[in-house]
Image: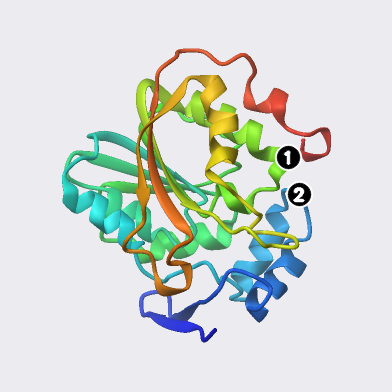
Amino acid sequence: MASTAVADVNAGRVAVTGPLDATNPAIVRMRQLVDGQQSADGWSRCWEQGVTPWDLGEPTPAVVKLVRSGTLPAGSVLIPGCGGGYDAVALSGAGRFAVGLDVCDAAIQRAKQWSSSSPDVAFVNADFFTWAPPEPFHLIFDYTFFCALDPSLRPAWAARMHELLRPDGELITLMYLPQDQESGPPYNTTVLDYEEVLKPLGFIIDSIQDNDVAVEPRKGLEKIARWKKMLDGAEKTASELLPTDAL
């Protein structure tokens, strides 16, 4: 499959997107650089070397569609694994203050440069699993984050989502659902994988549908789900669910 180049003028680079599998040389190289269950250094190497095949260089079309729908709650929004920050900027404004979070400082610096004229967004260089914000969020948006994590980290991901959301908060997962990956990231993912870790913590799906505005290489492989947090309290925290070698 041919790759699609998207110019990112503000960052002075060209972001390349294509199939997120081993047929894409950039994915092969990314896996070599990450080389670990939860490697901050690996992701930093990807950004420093320009190996970011997941990066569209602009807001995700589904995010733009959500914003235009007028159905998003006001208040604070968290975007974990925000990368270049395009979605955080798109989700900010109209009564929302967005926080983009990424473990990679190079990504955060690029996001800050790209968003310098946006007053309702901030970027934080920190680990999603250990970061302590001053208060929980009204909305969290996850895209190409869940599927990038080693599957052993998924229960901790869910517990962290529970911790970071207000009792009446909403989680939106734009789910990339690859099935035939021999390794990762991105790892094989199904809707059931989300349900298995979120439902025990009191999350229920309010709606789920195909992503009809997915970019060409990902068409037919994405669904968008909106989850409500219904219970106030998880049996275990994210730190208790992290594998020992990830601590």
Circles 2 and 1: CB atoms closer than 8 Å: yes
Q: Residue at x 64, y 27 (%)?
A: 238
- Disc 1 residue type (three-letter): Ser
Look at mark 1 in the image and give the residue it sits on.
Answer: 152
Does 77 appear above or below 12?
Answer: above
Does 195 appear above or below 233?
Answer: below
Q: Residue at x 82, y 33 (%)?
A: 244
Look at mark 2 in the image and give the residue it sits on.
Answer: 37
| Position in image of residue 209 (x %, y %) | 35, 48
Q: Residue at the bottom extreme?
A: 2
Q: Residue at x 42, y 67 (%)?
A: 219
**Residue in front for this viewpoint, 189 or 236:** 189
**Residue in front for this viewpoint, 130 or 52:** 52
* Quadrant in the picture for the N terminus: bottom right
Q: CA distance from mark 2 to mark 1?
A: 9 Å
Q: Residue at x 62, y 53 (%)?
A: 148
- Disc 2 residue type (three-letter): Gln
Query: On the rendered structure, is 153 left or right of 47?
Result: right
Task: Residue 86: tell me if it is visible.
Answer: yes
| Position in image of residue 15 (x %, y %) | 47, 77
Query: On the rendered structure, is 223 left or right of 38?
Result: left
Instruction: Pick whichever of labels 2 and 1 is earlier in the sequence.
Output: 2
Label annotation for residue 215: none
Q: Residue at the right extreme?
A: 245
